[in-house]
């Protein structure tokens, strides 16, 4: 059954046939139930909606329900504990569907969703029910949302170049003083080639604003006017295209036709796998294709390149994608039951994006599992894979990469020859194709089967040889190898031969360095390479590439070098040296993570990630549990800071499963890692015994010993951690312990509990560590607000937002910017508040962390309330108040705050009945922070005073003081003057007596105080 309310009331059955419902009250009852489809609506709410001030007899509602059941089916209206429920899906009610589409479209810039939302309207909302007050209020809200959504849709239409003037002009005329509509009309006129008319719109708007409001145009409108005058106005703001594609150091030669064909293939299939042997140019073709798609804007939500050559097993594929897109599984120290793949499903769920998965042959099973999962869950996602063989999942389209063509008729234009010439010029300036060398160059390219890597390796020899000499040596080399491994594919033998030839021409130091570098799948930084002359030789010979500030081998060449290392008998020695180097690097970087150098340390560990996990993987394979535990200890905080919980759990479980005796000095680390991994999987209580035992065992561990951080951080994962001052901590460890206590204390104890944030701030400021300092400042800002120091609160959280933004933890930064917006609004800086809030929402949507998005967007409501825009508060709240339901530590808090805001709006407007707090459930109150309870109690006090119960108001004010430890100074209820008016009503003595009664209550009394019922146990 469908309920249609965006126009005249209409009811449709499952076959889309109309259902007759005679009688306005019957239609009103169904409409009011449909507002909350699938949820119970109380009998009192329904009675008030239908009969308003003319209350009927007790059984009138029941009789009405009975008539509705006869018309639409008894099973469609279900009886609940306190009311009735319309048993239809929310999506079957057009106004609910409209709100969902509007929200999704406006949030993600989804033009298709906004168009669908607009198509649901058949006329004025609830057109034939406007005699009812509830319908009037809802119609006003819906029409306002319709206007906002229409403007957003038209802005996107303008951005795509669509001419919407016929629809836009009457709307802009109806909103002649709304500068947003006028700006949109100006852009639309400009993009359709009518700049003079756009300038006229500005002048008319400027005159109207001056005449009717005595105001000047906003800076935004004035800037647009100036841009049009300069003929440089953009049609509209377009989404920022996000990508991690790197610019290429060499030109793309010889595959222009393949590039066009692959772009077309990706447009027609969501998974395209570029296949071919090593050295065929798969990676470069895929990268160029991705760059072309990014440039055309057909993947507006991002184009991401993911290198899989350095992954160690299938479980690292999803984390590798997360690292590439810069996302984390969850916030820092935030419990999360999701794995990396689930987070990716969430991230790409409504994204029109492209991922390039490179070198998939290393982890075919892992790639197949992830690709199938993401493509099934994310309809806008496309994938290009490069692999020596097919991924082999449904829907895959293969693109076998052909060799570069060699034309003897027109050599200069053939792709293989062009590539050779261009690369030869790079090492031998002045070289050009002429009559003397053309035949030799063609022969080289023909003998190398047009394999780009082989051609480039041969061209690199032009530094010392000419083309004829190279051709002669290739003839000799291939003759020598003609009898070897005839079962190998021809192109594989060709590439092996040319790599072998290049290898044999290396000096001994160059071979030694090449074998040393081959064990580092993520490459090496310059500082880690001792023999710079040998490095220069390998780069000159195209055996090592420079990748930014790092040096690495193409995977085909690295595989060859690994084989030569195995033959040399030095493989174990080199691997041991690698492990020693990586442990030292990880431990040094781990220390820097807790200093002012932490940004560089995060960047270094991210760049070295493939090498570091390779060391852990080898430790597992060789039962070297000591090395494994040392690496886990060094990477623990990095994984926490980056939110890489799947990796942490995977490698911890793998190392701890090694059947070997744990070294004594690492036993405490092993226990704590076991407990934390169990906690991450099954909640805080699951691993506490192991964590406590590990802490006790490591109590006397040396400050520089492996696992020291784990011992100091262990209590953060315990529900009953001892105070920081009782644990003999210092430096960052002390600051973190104080911060954790302040954060928890601020929620449970209020002013007294938050006090340790100042000490934590001092510790982190001395260290220069950004995350800890920012987190302490956020707690401090909350406390300063309680004390009434709104300017101090704004300053503190502004610094926190800057630090988190600088650190790159954008989910945390988004939340800090949203908090900043509220303090700025309370301090009277409305424009600054909106800019901060927009930045917070933009950052959250960029990293697509659901809790951060919901949290940042929720702040629209209190900012709007602070600015006195009460109607808009009620418009915003339905879409945001439930978005955090289920979020650990946040869902209950935000529900209490939202309910308090609803009641504040009713009180501020002086009309209606406050029902927000009264409608809370016990679980919301029990799970809320004391600051939330204080706010709700002060709002409840104002409601009690309005109801004539001044004594109850005084008690609730006292209870608010007891919860927070101070009379709340945030100012949200200042205009109500609740305490002053209550004191006037009771007199000072009686007020104080009742106030003291409330102040004597504790948190266990919150349900009774706020909801008026005893707490159930």
Image: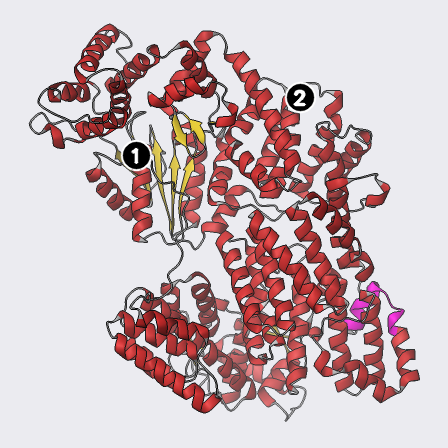
Circle 2 packing at 10 Å, graded few (<14), some (14-19), many (20+), is many
Name the spot of residue 730 as percent of width and height, x first.
Answer: 79, 40
Query: In the rendered image, which quarter is residue 737 located in?
Result: top right
Question: Tag 1, which secondary structure?
Answer: loop
Q: Is residue 79 visible?
A: no
Q: Quadrant of the N terminus?
A: bottom left
Question: Residue at position x 72%, y 82% from top?
Answer: 976
Taking the image as shown, residue 499 lies to the left or right of residue 702, namely left
Distance (Cα) linking label 1 and label 2? 44 Å
Taking the image as shown, residue 207 lies to the left or right of residue 163, namely right
Compared with 971, 464 (above or below) is: above
Q: Nearer the viewer, residue 458 or 41?
A: 458
- What kind of colouring is applied to the model shown? secondary structure
Question: Tag 2, which secondary structure?
Answer: helix
Report the residue marked by disc 1.
250
Q: Which mark is residue 626?
A: 2
Compared with 624, 547 (above or below) is: below
First-in-chain label (1 vs 2): 1
Name the spot of residue 350 as percent of width and height, x first.
Answer: 43, 55
Question: Residue at position x 20%, y 16% from top?
Answer: 466
């Amino acid at each position: 059954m469908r309920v249609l309310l965006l126009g005249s009331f209409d009811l449709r059955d499952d076959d889309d046939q109309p259902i007759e419902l005679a009688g306005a009250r019957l239609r009103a009852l169904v409409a009011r139930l449909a507002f909350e489809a699938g949820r119970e609506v109380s009998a009192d709410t329904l009675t008030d909606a239908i009969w308003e001030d003319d209350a009927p007899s007790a059984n009138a509602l029941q009789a009405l329900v009975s008539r509705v059941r006869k018309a639409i089916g008894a099973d469609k209206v279900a009886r609940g504990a306190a009311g009735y429920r319309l048993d239809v899906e929310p999506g079957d009610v057009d106004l609910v569907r409209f709100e969902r589409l509007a929200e999704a479209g406006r949030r993600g810039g989804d033009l298709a969703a906004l168009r669908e939302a607009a198509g649901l309207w058949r006329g004025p909302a609830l057109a034939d029910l406007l005699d009812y007050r509830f319908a009037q209020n809802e119609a006003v809200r819906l029409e306002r949302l319709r206007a906002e959504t229409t403007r957003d849709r038209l802005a996107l239409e303008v951005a795509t170049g669509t001419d919407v003037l016929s629809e836009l002009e009457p709307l802009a005329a109806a909103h002649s003083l709304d500068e947003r509509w006028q700006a949109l009309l100006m852009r639309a006129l400009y993009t359709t080639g009518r700049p003079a008319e756009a300038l006229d719109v500005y002048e008319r708007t400027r005159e109207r604003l001056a005449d009717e409001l005595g105001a000047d145009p906003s800076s935004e409108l004035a800037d647009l006017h100036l841009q049009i005058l300069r003929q440089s106005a953009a049609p509209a703001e377009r989404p920022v295209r996000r990508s991690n594609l790197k610019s290429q150091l060499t030109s793309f030669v010889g595959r222009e036709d393949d590039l066009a064909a692959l772009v077309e293939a990706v447009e027609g299939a969501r998974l395209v796998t570029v296949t071919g042997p090593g050295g065929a140019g798969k990676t470069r073709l895929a990268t160029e294709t991705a760059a072309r798609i990014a440039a055309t804007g057909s993947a507006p939500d991002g184009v991401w390149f993911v290198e899989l050559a350095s992954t160690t097993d299938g479980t690292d594929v999803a984390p590798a994608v997360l690292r590439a897109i810069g996302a984390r599984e969850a916030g820092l120290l935030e419990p999360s039951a999701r794995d990396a793949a689930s987070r990716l499903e969430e991230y790409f769920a409504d994204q029109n994006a492209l991922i390039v998965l490179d070198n998939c042959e290393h982890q075919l099973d892992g790639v197949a599992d992830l690709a199938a999962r993401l493509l099934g869950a994310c309809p806008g996602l496309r994938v290009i894979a490069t692999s020596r063989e097919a991924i082999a999942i449904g829907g895959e389209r293969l693109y076998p990469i052909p060799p570069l063509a060699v034309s003897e008729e027109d050599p200069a234009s053939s792709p293989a020859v062009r590539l050779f010439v261009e690369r030869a010029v790079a090492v031998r300036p002045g070289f050009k194709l002429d009559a003397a060398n053309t035949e030799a160059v063609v022969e080289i390219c023909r003998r190398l089967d047009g394999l780009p890597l082989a051609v480039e390796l041969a061209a690199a020899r032009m530094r010392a040889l000419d083309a004829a000499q190279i051709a002669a040596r290739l003839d000799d080399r291939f003759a020598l190898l003609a009898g070897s491994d005839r079962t190998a594919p021809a192109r594989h033998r060709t590439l092996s031969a040319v790599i072998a030839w290049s290898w044999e021409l290396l000096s001994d130091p160059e071979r030694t360095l090449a074998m040393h570098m081959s064990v580092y799948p993520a490459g090496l930084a310059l500082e880690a390479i001792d023999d710079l002359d040998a490095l220069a030789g390998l780069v000159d010979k195209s055996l090592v590439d420079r990748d930014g500030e790092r040096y690495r081998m193409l995977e085909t060449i690295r595989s060859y070098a690994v084989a030569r290392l195995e033959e040399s008998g030095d493989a174990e020695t080199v691997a041991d040296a690698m492990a020693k180097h990586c442990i030292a690097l990880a431990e040094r970087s781990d220390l820097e993570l807790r200093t002012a150098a932490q940004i560089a340390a995060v960047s270094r560990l991210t760049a070295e990630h493939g090498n570091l996990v390779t060391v852990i993987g080898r430790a597992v394979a060789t039962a070297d549990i000591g090395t494994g535990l040392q690496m886990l200890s060094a990477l623990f905080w990095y994984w926490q800071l980056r939110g890489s919980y799947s990796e942490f759990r995977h490698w911890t479980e793998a190392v701890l499963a090694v059947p070997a005796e744990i070294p004594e000095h690492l036993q405490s680390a092993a226990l704590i890692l076991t407990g934390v991994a169990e906690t991450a999987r099954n909640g805080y209580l699951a691993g506490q015994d192991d964590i406590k035992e590990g802490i006790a065992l490591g109590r006397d561990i040396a400050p520089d010993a492996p696992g020291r951080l784990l011992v100091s951080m262990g209590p953060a994962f315990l529900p009953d951690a001892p105070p920081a001052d009782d644990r003999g901590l210092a430096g960052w460890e002390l600051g973190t312990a104080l911060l954790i206590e302040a954060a928890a204390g601020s929620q449970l104890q209020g002013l007294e509990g938050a006090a340790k944030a100042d000490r934590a701030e001092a510790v982190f400021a001395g260290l220069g560590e950004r995350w800890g300092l920012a987190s302490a400042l956020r707690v401090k800002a909350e406390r300063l607000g309680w004390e009434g120091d709104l300017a101090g609160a704004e300053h503190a959280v502004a610094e926190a937002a800057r630090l988190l933004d600088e650190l790159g933890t954008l989910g945390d930064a988004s939340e800090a910017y949203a908090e900043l917006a509220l303090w700025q609004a309370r301090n009277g800086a409305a424009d600054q508040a909106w800019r901060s809030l927009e930045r917070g929402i933009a950052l959250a949507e960029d990293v697509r962390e659901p809790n951060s998005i919901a949290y940042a967007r929720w702040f629209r409501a209190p900012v709007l309330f602070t600015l006195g825009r009460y109607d808009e508060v009620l418009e915003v709240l339905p879409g945001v108040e439930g978005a955090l339901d289920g979020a650990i530590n946040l869902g209950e808090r935000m529900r209490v705050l939202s309910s308090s805001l609803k009641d504040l709006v009713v009180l501020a407007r002086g009309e209606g009945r406050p029902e927000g707090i009264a409608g809370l459930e016990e679980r919301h109150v029990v799970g809320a922070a004391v600051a939330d309870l204080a706010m709700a109690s002060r709002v409840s006090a104002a409601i009690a005073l309005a109801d004539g119960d001044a004594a109850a108001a005084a008690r609730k004010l006292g209870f608010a003081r007891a919860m927070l430890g101070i009379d709340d100074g945030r100012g949200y209820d200042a205009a109500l003057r609740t305490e002053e008016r209550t004191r006037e009503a009771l007199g000072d003595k009686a007020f104080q007596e009742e106030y003291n009664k409330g102040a004597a209550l504790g948190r266990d009394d919150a349900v009774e105080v706020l909801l008026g019922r005893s707490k159930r146990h």
